[in-house]
Image (tube, rainbow, N blue to C red):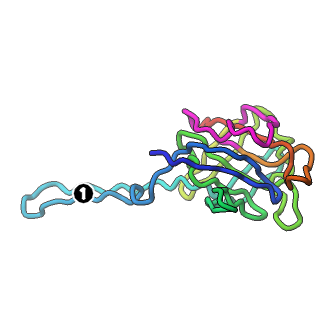
Amino acid sequence: MRQVLSATLLAVGLIGFATTQTLPHVPAALLQPIVAITNHDAAAPVAEVQPERDGAITRLVIASIGLDTPVRPAPLVDHNGVSTWDVPKFVAGHAEGSAGAGDRGNAILLGHVTSLTLGNVFEQLHAVSPGDPVEVYSPDARYVYRVADVTDVARTDLEVLDPTPNATLTLITCSGAWLPTVWDYSQRLVVRAELIH
C-alpha cells in the first residue's frame, strides 16, 4: 500500500525538497499481530502467534567518520499547508513512510549538518566513501549496509526519495551554499548504501 506524500522539507537547517512523492506506507492497523481464532470444542490445532519484527531504526553507526548516534522518528507534520518531515534535534531522524531497518525499499535517514540549536549529527557525512560499512540497528536486530554512492544534488532533486526495489539506506543532509533569500542550502549531500547482511 502506498501513501502520496507531498514533501517540502524546508530548511531551518536541513532539507528542502518540494514535490509529490509516493512512499511505501503500511497503516498501523495492518501492523497488529494476527491471532488465529480457533474452535476449542473441535480440537483444531492452535496457530502459534509469531512476534512481529520491529523495523524502526534506532541507531546509526558509521565507524569511518566516528559517527554513532541514536535515531529517532522523523514524523510527517504540516508546515504551512505542506507535509514535511520533522527532523529531530542533535540525532538522526528516520523518515516516516520510508522503509524500515533491513526491509526492501528506501530507508531514509535525515540529519542536520550544522546548527547551534538543531545540532550537527551529519557534519562529517561528506567524508564517507564508497565501500564504507554503515551499521543500522532496530530494536531486535543489526543490519550492515555498504556505501555505494556519495553525491551532491540540487535541493529540489527528489529522485533520492524514490522507493527502491532492494533494501537501500539513504542518508541526507544539507550542503552547498547558504541561500538567505529562501533560508536554505543550495544542495543536498546524499549517501546511498545497499544492504549486505
Residue shown at the point (12%, 61%) measured from the top left: 39
Is residue 38 or residue 46 the one in the foreground?
38
- Local packing at callout 1 (Cα closer than 10 Å; few below 14, some 14-19, many 20+) is few
Residue shown at the point (82%, 37%) measured from the top left: 152
Most extreme residue toward the left is: 42
What segment is highlighted magenta in the picture? 147-170
> What's the residue type where badge 1 is placed?
Ala
Most extreme residue toward the bottom is: 117
Q: Quadrant of the C terminus?
A: top right
Relative height, residue 127 to residue 73 (above, below): above
Can you give x and y, in whole percent of width and height, for residue 104 in the image? Answer: 53, 39
Is residue 76 or residue 92 the one in the foreground?
76
Left or right: 98, with 116 as reference point? left
Residue shown at the point (12%, 55%) measured from the top left: 44
Left or right: 175, with 35 as reference point? right
Residue shown at the point (82%, 64%) measured from the top left: 118
Can you give x and y, in whole percent of width and height, for residue 192 in the image? Answer: 71, 37
Which residue has dot 1 on it? 36
Q: Quadrant of the N terminus?
A: top left
Is residue 96 or residue 146 the one in the foreground?
96
Relative height, residue 118 to residue 7 (above, below): below
Relative height, residue 94 to residue 129 (above, below): below
Question: Magenta stretch: residue 155 in it?
Answer: yes
Question: Magenta stretch: residue 174 in it?
Answer: no
The quadrant holding residue 175 is: top right
Left or right: 67, with 30 as reference point? right
